[in-house]
Image: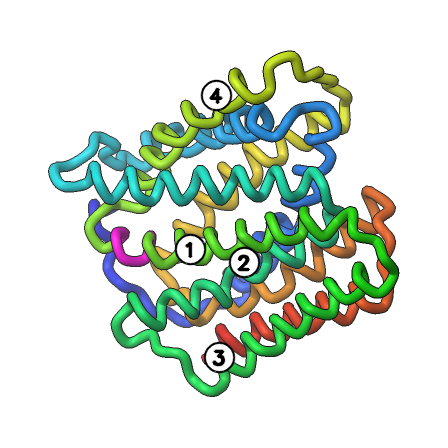
């Protein structure tokens, strides 16, 4: 593998499309696995376990691919900046998911492409908002408001705070995506992931030691499986596989497939956690998914 991959625009074949759809399905289960993991492990400890596993997977894969992991001159400040955003994004995702349903968390975290489009409009040359992207963002926001409306209409305010925190996480994820796009031009993607976890894991450890002191831990079979899923499948396999796909194929041709993620997440939440799927949740998820499609459509 070369130290700096060329920008690729190959036409993806059926096998690659199927692989990306698999990634969308797996990411759809992320909020579900977080919700299950939080039943026995507090948020910061859960993030620590998840990214220790992910760090191990990414390090082994990078060494296998013979990628130089030593930080190069001029990379420290960009890596610290993106790591701060990453740490805040994961923190808000775990905290928000703890006080809302996994199905709702999946919908709100899946809004990140819209925040990506907004930030990219100002910070990424040539990536301006078009009429189609604006329509997509409007539809997605309509889906969010509809989902909120379900809470407000029936007086169920318990989830509202969690929804807002996960929505903030989606905003931070959009910001991290744009920042990553800018700095990835000079930093190898695997090295970026390696140092991102080097900087973020101690923050999760310290936060857990100070804020979760005395918290109880219960390691059930489901909880351990959820932690392994987040660490090995999401933070390891999905991160590495998606980065590898991007080395050869244009992201604009593939990212559209991720509009399936919120639908997969809602379905998995229903099947594994028994989350209620009401009319507003279904319509809201569909609006968010279609909005993602419009934003990312060529």
At x 55%, y 32%, the residue is: 231
Task: In the rendered view, tell whether residue 226 sits above or below residue 245.
Answer: above
* Residue 138 is inside the magenta segment: no
Tell me how far mark 4 sits from mark 2, CA to CA. 32 Å
Residue 294 location, x and y as percent? 54, 78
Q: Which mark is residue 20?
A: 2
Q: Which residue is mark 4?
A: 205
Q: Residues within 10 Å of mark 4 (few under 14, many from 20)?
A: some
Among all residues in the image, which is located at the extreme bottom?
Answer: 131
Q: Of the residues under marks 4 and 2, which one precedes in the sequence?
A: 2
Q: Quadrant of residue 285?
A: bottom right
Q: Are marks 1 and 4 in contact (CB under 8 Å)?
A: no
At x 46%, y 52%, the residue is: 172
Q: Residues within 10 Å of mark 3 (few under 14, many from 20)?
A: many
4 or 2: mark nearer the eye: 4
Tell me how far mark 2 sits from mark 3, CA to CA. 22 Å
């Amino acid at each position: 593998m070369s130290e700096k991959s060329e920008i690729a625009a190959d036409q993806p074949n059926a096998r690659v499309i199927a692989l990306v759809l698999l990634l969308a399905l797996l990411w759809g289960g992320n909020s579900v696995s977080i919700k299950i993991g939080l039943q026995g492990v507090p948020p910061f400890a859960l993030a620590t376990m998840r990214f220790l596993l992910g760090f191990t997977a990414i390090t082994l894969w990078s060494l296998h691919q013979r990628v130089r992991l030593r930080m190069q001159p001029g990379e420290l400040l960009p890596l610290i900046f993106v790591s701060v955003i990453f740490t805040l994004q994961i923190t808000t995702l775990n905290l928000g998911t703890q006080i809302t349903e996994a199905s709702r968390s999946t919908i709100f975290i899946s809004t990140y492409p819209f925040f990506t489009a907004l930030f990219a409009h100002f910070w990424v040359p040539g990536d301006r908002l078009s009429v189609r992207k604006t329509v997509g963002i409007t539809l997605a926001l309509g889906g969010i408001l509809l989902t909120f409306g379900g809470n407000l209409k029936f007086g169920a305010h318990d989830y509202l705070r969690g929804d807002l925190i996960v929505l903030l996480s989606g905003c931070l994820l959009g910001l991290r995506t744009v920042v990553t796009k800018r700095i990835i031009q000079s930093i190898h993607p695997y090295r970026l992931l390696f140092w991102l976890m080097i900087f973020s894991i101690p923050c999760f450890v310290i936060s857990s030691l100070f804020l979760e002191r005395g918290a109880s831990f219960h390691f059930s079979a489901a909880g351990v499986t959820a932690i392994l899923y987040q660490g090995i499948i999401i933070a390891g396999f999905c991160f590495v596989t998606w980065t590898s796909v991007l080395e050869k194929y244009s992201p604009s041709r593939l990212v559209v497939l991720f509009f399936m993620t919120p639908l997969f997440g809602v379905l998995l939440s229903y099947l594994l956690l028994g989350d209620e799927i009401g009319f507003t949740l279904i319509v809201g998820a569909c609006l968010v998914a279609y909005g993602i499609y419009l934003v990312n459509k060529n």
